[in-house]
C-alpha cells in the first residue's frame, strides 16, 4: 500500500472564504455580483421522456435559470437573481415557488419582437439553404411539480494569484469561485482533485517530496490555464446578459443561434467543456 505523510502536504478544501488561503497571504482578485443563486432539488414531469437527459437554461430578466438533470424525474436548480428578488423567492411557499418557476421556464412575454423576427429569418435560411432543422422549436420545457432543499447562495468571483505554497495546495472553491451560469464550478473542483492526485502520484513514483514547490507548481500551472479563461468567460457572459439594449440583445441572440445551427462549433464547444473533467456534471 502506498503511504502518504499527511504532514508533507496540506490540501485546502475549506471553501471560498478559505482560512488556509488567507494564512498563505496570497493576493486574491475577488468581487461580489450582488446576486444570489437559488439552488434546490426539483421533481419534474416531461412531456417527452427522452428530454429527461436535457439540461435547460434560460436567460430571463431576473437572471440565468438552469435546470440540470439528475435522474428521469429529478433535477437540480440554479436560479440567479439580484438579492431582492432572491429574498422574495425564498419567502414563497412551495406551491408559490413552483408556480413562479414554471412561469419562468415557459414565459415568452419579455422577449424582443425584432430579435425574434430576425431569428425566425435565420432559422428559415438554415432550413432552406443548409437543411438544418430548427430542433429547439419542438422542445417543451419540463413541468416542475415539487421542490425541496431550497437555499440562497451569495455569488462572487474569487481568483487567487497562486494555488500553491510550500506544502500547501488549494482545490475547489478555495482555489477559485466562478459565476454558476455555465454550471462549471463543480467540474473545475473535480478536475483540481484529479490533477493534484496525478502530481502527487508522479512525485511519489519519482521518490520526491510531494510538498515541494517543484511539483506543486505543475499543478498550479495546469489548473490556472484551464480555470482562468472559464472564470472570466462566465463573468463576461453574466455582464453581457445584463444588457437590455436591443442591438446587444440581437447580437448575442444571433451568436447563440448560430452556434446551435453549426454542428462543427457545437462539437468543438462540447469537447472543450468536456475536457474539464471525465466526470462531467452538465
Image (cartoon, rainbow, N blue to C red):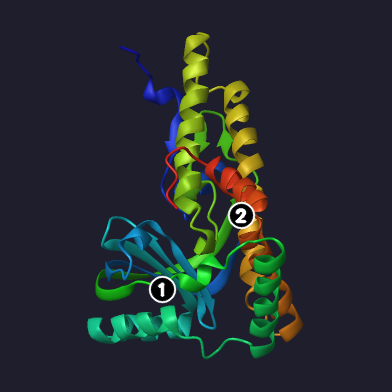
- Distance from the alpha carbon under mark 1 to that under mark 2: 31 Å
Mark earlier in primary sequence (1, 2): 1
Tell me the SS state at disc 1.
Answer: loop
Side of 132 where 250 appears, left or right: right
Q: Residue 129's x, y, as percent?
A: 72, 64
Is residue 18 visible in the rendered structure shown here?
Answer: no
Residue 235: name its quadrant: bottom right
Is residue 281 visible in the rendered structure shown here?
Answer: yes
Residue 59: name its quadrant: bottom right
Question: Residue drawn at (49%, 24%), measured in percent from left and top?
Answer: 198
Residue 275: name its quadrant: top right
Side of 147 where 246 appears, left or right: right
Question: Residue drawn at (65%, 46%), measured in percent from left and top?
Answer: 161
Q: Which residue is mark 1?
A: 140
Residue 31 or residue 117, whichever sits in front: 117
Q: Which residue is mark 2?
A: 231
Residue 2 vs 256, above or below: the answer is above
Residue 11 vs 184, above or below: the answer is above
Quadrant in which the N terminus appears: top left
- Residue 56 is marked as none
Amino acid at each position: 500500500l502506498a503511504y502518504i505523510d499527511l504532514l508533507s502536504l496540506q490540501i485546502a478544501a475549506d471553501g471560498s472564504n478559505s482560512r488556509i488561503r488567507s494564512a498563505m497571504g496570497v493576493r486574491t482578485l475577488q468581487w461580489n455580483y450582488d446576486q444570489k443563486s437559488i439552488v434546490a432539488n426539483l421533481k419534474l414531469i416531461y412531456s417527452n421522456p427522452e428530454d429527461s437527459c436535457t439540461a435547460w437554461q434560460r436567460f430571463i430578466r431576473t437572471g440565468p435559470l438552469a435546470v440540470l438533470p439528475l435522474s428521469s424525474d429529478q433535477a437540480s436548480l440554479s436560479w440567479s437573481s439580484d438579492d431582492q428578488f432572491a429574498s422574495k423567492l425564498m419567502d414563497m411557499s412551495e406551491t408559490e415557488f413552483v408556480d413562479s418557476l414554471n412561469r419562468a421556464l415557459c414565459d415568452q412575454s419579455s422577449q424582443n419582437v425584432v430579435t425574434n423576427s430576425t431569428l425566425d429569418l435565420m432559422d428559415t435560411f438554415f432550413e432552406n439553404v443548409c437543411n438544418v432543422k430548427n430542433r429547439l422549436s419542438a422542445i417543451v420545457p419540463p413541468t416542475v411539480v415539487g421542490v425541496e432543499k431550497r437555499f440562497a447562495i451569495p455569488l462572487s468571483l474569487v481568483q487567487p494569484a497562486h494555488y500553491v505554497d510550500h506544502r500547501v495546495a488549494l482545490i475547489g472553491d478555495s482555489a477559485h469561485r466562478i459565476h454558476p451560469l455555465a454550471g462549471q464550478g463543480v467540474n473545475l473542483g473535480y478536475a483540481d482533485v484529479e490533477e493534484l492526485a496525478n502530481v502527487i502520484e508522479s512525485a511519489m513514483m519519482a521518490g520526491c517530496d510531494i510538498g515541494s514547490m517543484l511539483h506543486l507548481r505543475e499543478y498550479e500551472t495546469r489548473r490556472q490555464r484551464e480555470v482562468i479563461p472559464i472564470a472570466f468567460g462566465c463573468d463576461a457572459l453574466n455582464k453581457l446578459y445584463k444588457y437590455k439594449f436591443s442591438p446587444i440583445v440581437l447580437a448575442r441572440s444571433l451568436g447563440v443561434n448560430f452556434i446551435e445551427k453549426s454542428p462543427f462549433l457545437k462539437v468543438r464547444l462540447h469537447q472543450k467543456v468536456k475536457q474539464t473533467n471525465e466526470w462531467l456534471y452538465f
